[in-house]
Image (tube, rainbow, N blue to C red):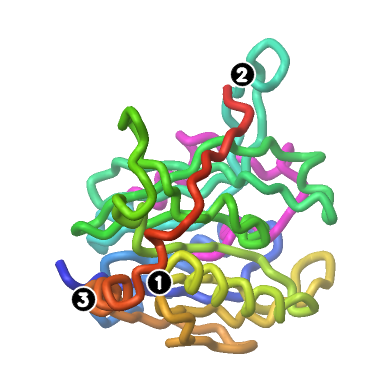
Amino acid sequence: MSTLSVTIIQANLHWEDKADNLKMLEEKINSIKEKTEIVVLPEMFTTGFSMKPKLLAETMEGETVQWMKRVAADKKIILTGSVIIKAPSLLERAGGEAYFNRLIWMLPNGQYGVYDKRHLFAYAGEDDHYTAGTKRLIASVKGWKINLLVCYDLRFPVWARQSSLTPNLSPPVERGERAAEYDVLIYVANWPEKRIHAWKTLLQARAIENQCYVVGVNRVGNDGNNIHYSGESMIVDPMGEVLYTKKEEEDIFTMALDKIYLQNVREKLPFLKDADNFQTITNSE
């Protein structure tokens, strides 16, 4: 339980072509030789970062979710990444359909969790086509807690911040009395090369301020809007040191994260206990 093996797949996605992407990604997953427990795919891994949800969205009963169930079961892995999903939403009029940039956390037994991207990238019009999520998803694996977020969320540190309030306790715990809320922060992304300095800097910042491992998975290549992605997926340790990164090339990389090292960092540098108490309030369904 002291290690957690994570595999990054940095891929050149086929623009708005689900069939080719699923075929390509399954070949990459099948090529993994190392023992791994979690395989992380980029944001919108079936389409690229598309603003055509009416054309491309699937339901949670659709082909991509079924593919994730099959691959996770066959490979005995947890499989995660985001896809365009159409689902009921009480935020829409009369409880109608809405479109989500939805991260799916698929377990080998077919059970899954979901996280709907909270911060929609208005600069590209994402907020005109998709509905923002209202809840975080923190998963648990072998005693590790994993916070799952999507791309633009990276620019908003409050949404990722280790909470200083323990849920369901009244009164809340005081400063210095709580354990860390999570151990690993995962971002799946389509982050353009022209702003890659922010990507790299903020991944390291999130690791340092939250005293956790950070795994950021980006794509490479050009999309259908001729936007270039240089990849530069990263694994960062709780001190902010970059343990892995790869520029411009497709890559499959597996690393075992070390829980003992993480605990030693938190014990020797007990900064989280001095964090400010706060609560994040969002509009909820």
Q: Earlier in the sequence, mark 3 or mark 2?
A: 2
Residue 44 sits in quarter: bottom right
The image quarter containing residue 123 is bottom right
Residue 158 x %, y % = 59, 52
Q: Which residue is mark 2?
A: 90
Are there few (<14), some (14-19), or many (20+) residues within 10 Å of tag 2? few
Is 151 in front, or is 166?
166
Q: Residue furthest left?
A: 1
**Can residue 23 be seen at all in this image of the molecule?**
no
Among numbered discs 3 and 1, the one appearing first in the sequence: 1
Secondary structure beneath label 3: helix
**63 is higher (above) or lower (below) than 183:** above
Which type of secondary structure does the marked residue at label 2 adopt?
Answer: loop
Looking at the rendered image, the disc whose residue lies closer to the viewer, 1 or 2, is 1
Magenta stretch: includes residue 55: yes
Secondary structure of the residue carrying tag 1 is strand
Q: Is residue 195 visible?
A: yes
| Residue drawn at point x = 55 percent, y = 65 percent | 42
Prevalent SS, magenta region: loop
Q: Residue at x 71, y 48 (%)?
A: 120
The amino acid at mark 1 is Tyr
Residue identified by numbered label 1:
213
**Which three-letter amino acid code belongs to the residue tagged 3?**
Ile
> Magenta part of the protein: which range?
41-69
The three-letter amino acid code for the residue at tag 2 is Leu
Q: What residue does disc 3 label?
A: 260
Quick one: 150 or 267, which is closer to the camera? 267
